[in-house]
Structures are given as C-alpha cells and as structure tokens.
Image (cartoon, helix red, strand yellow):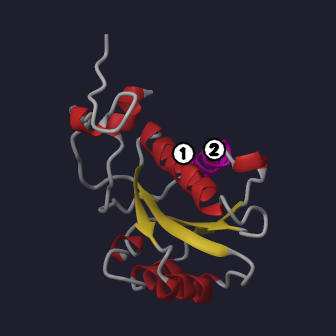
C-alpha cells in the first residue's frame, strides 16, 4: 500500500482511450469506502463523460484545463446538512481513495480544486445542474496517462515530525 501511495502522482495529460465503465465503478466504490465522521457519508458524485460538459469544466479556472482532455471527470459533492462540521473532510477522504484507486488500476488522475472558491463552485453547479443543497469540493480528471511521472522516492520529512511536544524531534527506535 505504501508503494501505491508513493506511485500516485497528479497526471494532467491523457490518451484518447476511453475509461471502462467498470473502472469508473471501481473508483466510486473505493471513494465510498472512505472513512466518514459518524458514518454520515455526505458524498455524492457526478460522472461526466460528455465532451461539451468536460470542456465547460475545463474553463472554470486556469488549473482545470485537463478536464477537456480527460475522458472522465468526476465531480465530488457533499451534503453539508448530513454533517455540517465534517463534510469537507469526508469528501476529501473519498477523493483520496478515488485517486489511489485510479493509480491501482493504471489510470492517471488529478484533483482539481473547487472549494472554497464560491465562483468556482457556482460554475460547476451551473454546468452540472448541481442542486443548491449540495456543495462542490473538487473535480477529478481521470484517464489513461499520456505522461509518466516517477514515483516519489522518499516523501518523508523528518523535520515535520515532532515527538511528544512540538519542536522536539521524534526518533524511531
């Protein structure tokens, strides 16, 4: 599992090869296996495969351009009424599971931030006809990678780990 986590990289270029529906289903299953505060599971998803919609999503901000090329874009939504205090964390955990599942299937993916920018959320809401009761956390572009990125060698940063109190080094025995 640790090797899979290190292999996951943000992929922004995709081939024209379609993503199988079964693969998308597996991504959604992984997303919905995420931890959720009090098991409220506030998440909902919109699977976007139509080119005009993906093109529209690509225009919501300067870092969403890859949505036009990716054969699938998943919009990660959440119902804040289900858990007003934890909907962001729950939807983020679901998104991370989705990203890891994409890597496990040999797919490329990238998290495209929407929340907390109201103008981005309004754009996604308008394009995908998301009801007002739901919030938009992010978009995830998914496809077969047209670029390769090396696995992270050693992302562990000793200086960011403290023992017992902040400022004291934590040392593994």
Q: Quadrant of residue 63?
A: bottom left
| Residue 114 in picture, x, y percent from top left | 48, 74
| Residue 158 in picture, x, y percent from top left | 23, 32
N-terminal of the pair, mark 1 or mark 2, is 2
Q: Residue at x 65, y 43 (%)?
A: 35
Work out whether residue 138 or residue 156 is closer to the camera in this orientation and state it: 156
Task: Assess whether residue 32 is covered by the magenta stretch.
Answer: yes
Q: Which mark is residue 121?
A: none
Would you call the spot at circle 1 few (<14 residues within 10 Å), some (14-19), or many (20 or more)?
many
The magenta-colored residue range is 23-34
What distance separates the C-alpha of mark 1 from that of mark 2?
A: 6 Å
Work out whether residue 148 or residue 98 is closer to the camera in this orientation and state it: 98
Mark 1 and mark 2 residues within 8 Å of each other at the beta carbon: yes
Q: Which residue is mark 1?
A: 97
Q: Which residue is mark 2?
A: 34
The furthest residue to the top: 173
Callout 1 secondary element: helix
Callout 2 secondary element: loop
Task: Assess whether residue 56 is covered by the magenta stretch.
Answer: no
Q: Residue at x 31, y 34 (%)?
A: 161
* Left or right, residue 163 beside residue 139: left
Vertical placement of residue 27 versus 113, above or below: above
| Residue 76 in picture, x, y percent from top left | 59, 65
| Residue 116 in picture, x, y percent from top left | 49, 75
Vertical placement of residue 55 versus 80, above or below: below
* Left or right, residue 154 beside residue 72: left
Quarter in which the C terminus is drawn: top left
Vertical placement of residue 98 versus 16, above or below: above
Q: Can you see residue 46?
A: no
């Amino acid at each position: 599992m640790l090797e899979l986590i290190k292999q996951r990289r943000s992929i922004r270029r995709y081939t024209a090869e379609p993503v199988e529906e079964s693969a998308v289903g597996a991504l959604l299953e992984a997303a919905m296996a995420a931890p959720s505060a009090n098991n409220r599971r506030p998440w909902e998803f919109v699977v976007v495969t139509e080119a005009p919609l993906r093109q529209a999503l690509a225009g919501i901000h300067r870092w969403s351009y890859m949505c036009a090329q990716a054969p699938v874009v998943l919009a990660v939504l959440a119902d804040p009424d289900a858990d007003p205090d934890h909907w962001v964390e729950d939807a983020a955990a679901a998104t991370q599971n989705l990203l890891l599942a994409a890597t496990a299937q040999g797919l490329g993916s990238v998290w495209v931030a929407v929340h907390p920018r109201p103008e981005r959320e309004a754009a996604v809401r308008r394009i995908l006809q998301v009801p007002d009761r739901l919030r938009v956390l992010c978009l995830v572009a998914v496809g077969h990678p047209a670029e390769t990125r090396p696995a992270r060698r050693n992302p562990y940063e000793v200086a960011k780990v403290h023992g017992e109190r902040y400022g004291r080094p934590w040392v593994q025995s």
